[in-house]
Image (cartoon, helix red, strand yellow):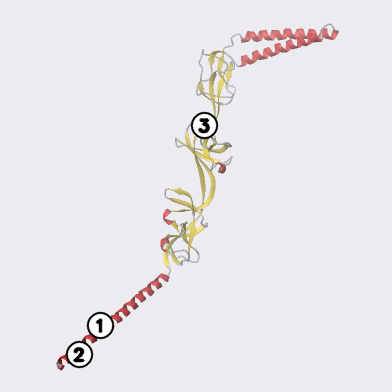
Amino acid sequence: MRRSYILAFIFAVVVVGWVASGQFGSDEEAQDQGAANASTTEASARAHDEPVSVRVRQRIAKEQTRNLVLRGRTEANRWVDIKAETKGRVTEVVAKEGARVARGDVIVKLAMEDRAEKLAEAEARVRQRQIEFDAAKSLRRKGFRAETKTAESAAQLEAAIAYVAQISIDIDHTEISAPFDGVIDTRNVELGDFVEPGDVIARVVDQDPYLVVGQVSELDVGRVRLGDIGVARLANGDTVEGRVRYIATVADASTRTFRVELEVPNRDRKLRGGVTADIRIPVESVQAHFLTPALLTLDDDGILGVRTVNGSAMVEFKPVSIFATQTDGVWVTGLPETVTIITVGQEFVRHGETVVPVTDDGEKTS
């Protein structure tokens, strides 16, 4: 039995020794693993402290113009419906529709009827009244005629003269002429028609200069100035250039927009009224940079900008504003005239971080 105690004791010692040896081995492995992790962390930190290479490109600002775009139409500079000022039958049509006329050119003639005879009678009456008045004055000087009778003779003479003038004007109105240079757009009478005073005879349109008319919003009207140069693209693809000659002072009650007139030359008479047009009026010029949208980013506060590199190879975040957009990029403002922009790697660096800038041709910048 004593022998059994001895064997049990030896076995217990062996087990305790084995357990102790395993524990010590695990501690050493844990220490080795911790040291390895620390080395990796330290190596990672050292790698993080090394400057990151980024690809950059230098950009130079260019002058860009913001255009105010209006939807409009072409319109004649002026036109007038010529109306008859006396009655009569149309005896001659001088100008046809579409004909160009100069100021004073006859368009239509009316019948004289008995106007010539009335004029001759009136002129004879004037001569009679003149003789009567001269006699009255002579008798008055001799004291044989009352002053009232002399005044009556003078009044009759003036009335006769006025009647001659009235008939002469009526005769002039039998020839209906153009009030200014233009084209006969429409003619409302034909040979043999009888017209009364107020009847429309024809419409004359002034073709040079022409107008391109648009409506500008109440927010933008203050940016347009008289004399501004504008360009209008017509529906048929033609482009015309002119100056702003008129800006309405009162808005349209229904649209709250203001009428703007662009006066354009039309010496070749190609422009016609009522053609749709897009009007572009430059209202602002700035220095801007053209960028692809991929270069734009947001900072921690959600501000739009780009990351640049300064002369010390340090990253700087520059806020920008979009000035204009195109199909292949955007024009932005807010950057210096010359700036070095990070084109590749901007998402992996931050403001104030030192980097190794490499140009697009593969050379490092100083």
Q: Residue 179: image x %, image y %? A: 59, 24
Q: Nearer the viewer, mark 3 or mark 1?
A: 1
Check disc 3 and give the amino acid type.
Glu
Check disc 2 and give the amino acid type.
Phe
Distance of mark 3 from mark 1, alpha carbons?
A: 102 Å
Residue on which disc 1 sits: 22
Q: Residue 101: image x %, image y %? A: 55, 24
User: Height in image: 5 above or below 90?
Assistant: below
Answer with mark 3 or mark 2, whichever residue precedes in sequence: 2
Report crowding for label 2: few under 14, some 14 to 19, many 20 or more residues within 10 A (C-alpha). few
Q: Residue at x 62, y 14 (%)?
A: 170
Badge number at residue 75:
3
User: Height in image: 217 above or below 15?
Assistant: above
> Taking 333 as reference, is 171 left or right?
right
Q: Which residue is at the front of the view, 181 or 229? A: 229
Residue on which disc 2 sits: 9
* Whether label 3 touches label 1, CB < 8 Å: no
Q: Residue furthest bottom?
A: 2
* Whether label 3 touches label 2, CB < 8 Å: no
Quadrant assignment, res 1? bottom left
- Could one spot residue 360 in this view of the protein? no
Q: Residue 279: image x %, image y %? A: 50, 39
Q: Which residue is at the front of the view, 128 or 248? A: 248
Check disc 1 and give the amino acid type.
Gly
User: Height in image: 128 above or below 263?
Assistant: above
* Whether label 2 touches label 1, CB < 8 Å: no
At mark 3, the secondary structure is strand
